[in-house]
Amino acid sequence: MNSIPIIARSASATFQKRGFSSGEKVWNVYLSGEIHSDWREVIAAGVTEKNLPVSLSSPNTSHEDSDDCGAIILGMEEKRQNWDKIGASMNNLRTKTLIKDADIVVVRFGPKYRQWNAAFDAGFASALGKEIITLHPPEISHMLKEVNSSASVVCEDASQVVDALAYAIHGSLPPPRDGDDYVPIADRLGKGNPNP
């Protein structure tokens, strides 16, 4: 078992937490959802920077290939609904397999497009009992309240996803997001267990 060094962070007071190790496990993380921004690249760079034992996977992020894969492999169809059906079925081979193999499923919802596939992936992952992290801007939180209620973590930006993975895997924490305004819960509300 690898030992993790003591991690120090500072806020209004300096305190230390001891990290923990998950051993040599490689975590399979499936990145579902919105394909119009670089959020997957941000997570990949963060995982690399923090040297996390993570294997990332995702659906085919080429919209054209995703739409046309069935017709390219199996032959063209005359009707759009048939074309879509064979493409969707072909994509399901990848998506369902990778979600089943995932330890954690990250589902990104962007503000611009309706992401029915992402919602379906979140539901499928939830039905399988997978751990879910949702990622979306705060202005669409209300629309995603049921999806978020199934998530273990709800993030607003990709760096929070990386920090959540680092905590889950190594127990390491970043500096407080609130900076010097951060106050530990024991200082704000008192100790939780009066008889530790």
Image (cartoon, grey):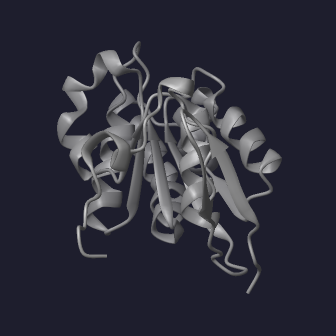
Residue located 63% across and 67% down the image: 19
Q: Position of residue 97 (x, y in %)?
A: 50, 66
Residue 83 placement: quadrant: top left
Task: Residue 151: tell me if it is visible.
Answer: yes
Q: Position of residue 114 (x, y in %)?
A: 34, 22
Query: How many tags in the picture?
Result: 0
In the image shown, does 183 or 55 lie closer to the viewer? Answer: 183
Which quadrant is home to the C terminus? bottom left
In the image shown, does 12 or 156 lie closer to the viewer? Answer: 12
Q: Residue furthest bottom?
A: 1
Q: Is residue 100 left or right of residue 120?
A: right
In the image shown, does 140 or 33 lie closer to the viewer? Answer: 140
Q: Is residue 184 left or right of residue 162?
A: left
Task: Residue 82: tell me if it is visible.
Answer: no
Q: Is residue 69 left or right of residue 139?
A: right
Residue located 50% across and 49% down the image: 91
In the image shown, does 83 or 140 lie closer to the viewer? Answer: 140
Q: Position of residue 67 (x, y in %)?
A: 52, 33
Which quadrant is home to the N terminus? bottom right
Q: Position of residue 148 (x, y in %)?
A: 27, 41
Residue located 63% across and 57% down the image: 172
Residue 22 placement: quadrant: bottom right
Residue located 62% across and 30% down the image: 39
